Image: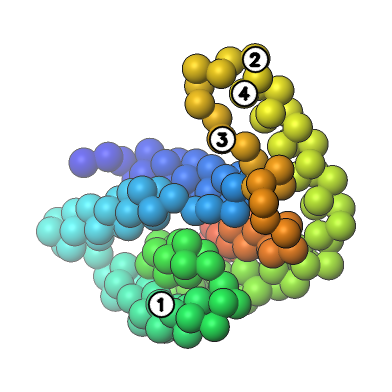
Amino acid sequence: MLPLAVTCIIVIAAIVWTSVTDLLYRRISNRIVATVLLLWMARTGWLLTFGTADGASLSGLLPASIVLVAGYLLFSMGWMGAGDVKLMAVLCLWMNDQALIFLIATALAGGLLALCMPVMRHLERALALALIQVAGRWPRLGIPAPYLFGNASGNDLPYGLAIAAGAGFTLWLGS
């Protein structure tokens, strides 16, 4: 079993990776979300098995369920991406009794992100151009073209950044 610190580092790395891929490709990998879920299940199972778990260890189940149901409705209306919903639900599990703070911080970060999108477009463009240069220099890597250079309109919000900010804030607050 991985120590808690290593597990948390993996989760934080996954959150950072999903925010970058969401910015560049408007995609959150199901593999990353599944990995974060499996790590939570392993950690919780370990805590329950050895009697070190308390009620707070499972307190994220209700918020995660609510996020999945509400998120499905938002996804079916085209207002939110499926990856965003799944990532938020899995992170609610990790946040335990801090899940409400996580959701509020994510919503506030999403509003700020929407206000800052003109500036974010410049960052996105710079990162996308750098990625295109790397792809041109090393074509064997098979790096796909970023979202910005595809056929997409570029008007949607990479909400993975807001989710990462909400998670970071909540983890920082809890430490």
- For the residues bearing labels 2 and 4, Cβ distance under 8 angstroms: yes
Secondary structure beneath disc 3?
loop
The amino acid type of the residue labelled 1 equals Leu
**Amino acid marked by disc 2:** Arg
Please tell me which of labels 1 and 4 falls first in the chain. 1
Amino acid type at mark 3: Pro
Q: Is residue 45 left or right of residue 148?
A: left
Task: Give the residue drawn at x 14%, y 56%.
Answer: 50
User: Are dots 3 and 4 in contact, CB under 8 Å?
Assistant: yes
Disc 1 and disc 4 in contact, CB within 8 angstroms: no
N-terminal of the pair, mark 3 or mark 2, is 2
Answer with the quarter of the image where residue 136 lies: top right
Neighbours of disc 3 within 10 Å: few (<14), some (14-19), many (20+): few
Please name the residue that numbered disc 2 is placed on. 137
Q: Nearer the viewer, residue 117 or 92?
A: 117
- Residue at which label 1 appears: 68
What whole-number distance in Å separates the C-alpha atoms at marks 1 and 4?
A: 36 Å
Q: Is residue 2 above or below residue 91?
A: above
Relative side of 93 to 162, left or right: left
The reply, left or right, for residue 98 in relation to residue 19 is left
Residue 70 place in picture, x, y as percent: 47, 84
Q: Residue at x 62, y 23 (%)?
A: 135
- Farthest residue, direction front: 151
Tag shown at residue 144: 3
What SS does tag 2 mark? helix
Residue 174's spot in the image, x, y percent?
A: 54, 61
On residue 135, which mark appears? 4
* Quadrant of the drawing holding the N terminus: top left
